[in-house]
Amino acid sequence: MEIKVINPVELGAPRGYSNGILATGGSLLFVAGQIGWTSDQEIISDDFAAQFEQALTNIQAVVRAAGGQVESVVRLTIYVTDKQEYQEKIRGVGESYRRVMGKHFPAMTLVEVKSLLDSSAKVEIEATAVI
């Protein structure tokens, strides 16, 4: 598998994501939306950054189970129930992101939604990986 980051100069330098990822030579893995819960399906904390980190950790568990690694993730869609809280907690979110994903920045989209299936969840993240 080969992954090439695509960041056209006309779009400026992205911060914390890539504008595009060109992936060749692998199989696609679609990871269902993951929230910040443990294997007991209990929300880890009320803290936004902690939920964010656990959701990413859960995604990585699925990717690893399929034979991939952090760099296999080519797209993240992040659903939040409160964009303002996300922005207020961005420093902790960034620290959480780096603990799980390192310096790998796939294509990403952030969407604010009214609510998530689990009423305690503040964030849900789905992923696409190339294995």
Image: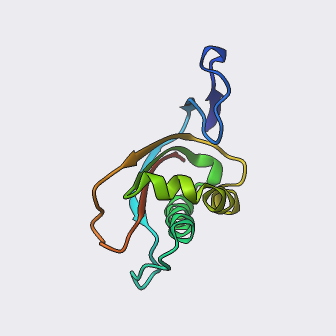
Does residue 115 sit above or below 75 in this rendering?
below
Q: How many marks?
A: 0
Left or right for 38, reference 98: left
- Give x and y (percent) for residue 54: 53, 70
- Give x and y (percent) for residue 17: 60, 39
Left or right for 20, reference 71: left
Q: Nearer the viewer, residue 32 or 11?
A: 11
Q: Which residue shows up at 63% across the image and 24% down it?
A: 7
Q: Is residue 119 visible?
A: yes
Image quadrant holding the N terminus, namely: top right
Q: Which residue shows up at 56% across the image and 33% down it?
A: 23
Q: Which residue shows up at 43% across the image and 79% down it?
A: 43
Q: How is the image coloured?
A: rainbow
Q: Which residue shows up at 41% across the image and 65% down it?
A: 122
Left or right for 101, reference 76: right
* Residue found at the very far top of the displayed protein: 10
- Give x and y (percent) for residue 49: 56, 66
Q: Is residue 31 visible?
A: no
Displayed quadrant of residue 15: top right
* Residue found at the very far bottom of the displayed protein: 40
Q: Nearer the viewer, residue 86 or 67?
A: 86
